[in-house]
Amino acid sequence: MDLKDSLRQDRARGKKKEPFSPSLFSHIGGLVRRHHLGGAFYRLIGPMTAKGIETLIRAYRAEAKPPYEAPLFFLATPEEYQLIHQVLTALDTPYLAWAQSPEEILLALPLWQRRPGLDPEALAGRHFAALWQQD
Amino acid sequence: MWRCLEADLEILVHQGHLYVPLLFDPEIHQESQALPFEKYVSEASPGGVPQSSLPAALTVKDRRFVQAVSAASLLEHYGRLFPREHEKRRLLLREQYSLTADLWGLALDPKLITIVFHILPHFLRREGFSPRRSLGEGEILDLIRERLRIPRRFHQEAQRFLDLAPLKVALQRLETAKLESRPPPEGLVLTATLRAWWEQNLTAHLLAEERARLLQELEDREPWAQAQEGRLAVLLYLADQGSLELDGFGFTRLKKGQDYRIYKRTGPYALKDFFGRLYLFPDCRVAVASLGRLRPVVVDHYKHPFLRQHGSGQDICLGAESPYLTFSAKNVIQALEEGINALFYGYDSRRRQGYHRLDALPGMMRLVDFEDYRIPEDHPLIVSGHVEVKNRTT
């Protein structure tokens, strides 16, 4: 490919608009503010026992995925920022981006550890509790 | 900022400036690490002196605040940002202090003043006055009064207007109101407290404005109080009607807003074609609108070599060199005269000017025909001198 074609391709690529998606910070921030989550919620994340997970799964496996639209931008109060930062540090999992409720935030890491290969469509359409069991 | 004031927050007020709590996202958090946060020291506390430059960020009890707007600007710019709400508050205050009834003075539109006192005299036939001497406002109103029948109600209105007592009473009522504004509370304050301060000061601000308006009205009306009632009745009549016609000059208020169509009648006139034949043109109104560019148009359904077609409201062809004129007495007079001169003297049967020719040359397509305007040379109007042939020399 000569320089002219390469330049033309670069320009064409540059013109393409990419859809804007909110950052993970905004995604979790929106949930934190919507459900008024605080320090008590963070205390639940750390010692997430098998029994705790089981209770959550039993309670929510028949539930539909709650609707949620993340804010495009999110500015947090110092307390909110601390909690979001703690959640993002403690739950290092790609499934967090599909969590749409506090319960799904809690289940995101165990679900990823149990079933790491779930496709985005399933994660976006079904409650994490419903995805716990193999289909 | 207004949303911040509506929320239940604690904000910091420092030297008349508002500092809002710093909100975070990862980028802001990173940047704020490098930002020097000064510790807030109240001016009232020992060692707290007013600083010449305000810090961009402050900390109070480990909480971070960043500088937003000045408290005074919340008052100054409220009217610009929320004109409807501002006007509603003003109306409520007027009702509260009974300023709405019988106070409305003669709010004369400045354009109407220009037309009546500066343009109309130029076109007015004046018997008994030297044409060189410019007429005073009183003399113009007298001239109009002589030729117009002013309805009785305008005389009654003029009498009421000359009575300054209600205005003075309204001013006295305002004197009793608290007009002084207080500085904003200093330090950490709840938005509710700041809102209360803002409400109070905005009221004082609006009342001060109302007082200034009433004082101005009193100042405007006092000279009139000494003038004759009849002259004032003329002005009130013109302000109400928005239209007048005298000696072929007139104006009418346009439907929307405070703009006017100012016109001058041409009267009938005759033009000569290449073969010396005469064409009698009927009277028409050449007008300009006070809105935007002043372009002379013929208001009536009319045809002329300098008009594009046989219709109404057409621009008169003035050539490419016509200047861009905006509303002023001098410019309106110039535009009207240019339009009339073009109709009277612009047509030259030996040149190709305008859109059409009076005479039809063989084989020529004619969009506008002037045959119906043809008159014999010994037409009584021409012979008697009632109608002038304008392009006699061509």
Image: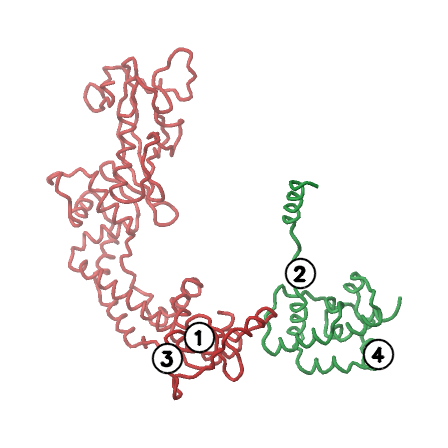
Chain colours: A green, B red
Between B265 and B210, the residue placed more toward the observer is: B210
Specify the subunit that label 1 lies on. B
Quarter of the picture containing the C terminus of chain B is top left
Q: Can you identify the residue that label 1 sits on?
A: B55
Residue B141 coordinates in the image, percent (x, y):
19, 48
**Residue sitting at 35 percent across and 71 percent down?**
B205
Instruction: Using the numbered discs, state the Cα–Cα distance from disc 4 to disc 3 in whole angstroms.
Output: 62 Å
Closer to the chain start, of discs 3 and 1, is 3
Identity of the amino acid at label 1? Pro
Residue B10 in the image: state x and y as whole percent.
51, 79
Q: CA distance from mark 4 to mark 1?
A: 53 Å
Task: Write down the residue under mark 4.
Answer: A54
The chain containing the residue under callout 2 comes to: A
Circle 4: residue type: Glu
Q: Which of the two marks, 4 or 2, is nearer to us in this view?
A: 2
Horizontal side of residue B108 vs B362, given as left or right: left
Label 4 residue SS: helix
Question: Which residue is depicted at the point 27% across and 45% down?
Answer: B328
Label 4 to label 2: alpha-carbon separation: 33 Å
Q: Which residue is mark 3?
A: B50
Mark 1 surroundings: few (<14), some (14-19) or many (≥20) residues within 10 A: some
Residue at x 11%, y 41% (from the top left corner): B129
Label 2 residue SS: loop
Of badges 4 and 3, the one in the foreground is: 3
Eye-nearest disc, 2 or 3: 3
Give x and y (percent) for residue A86.
Answer: 68, 77
Quadrant hosting residue B302 = top left
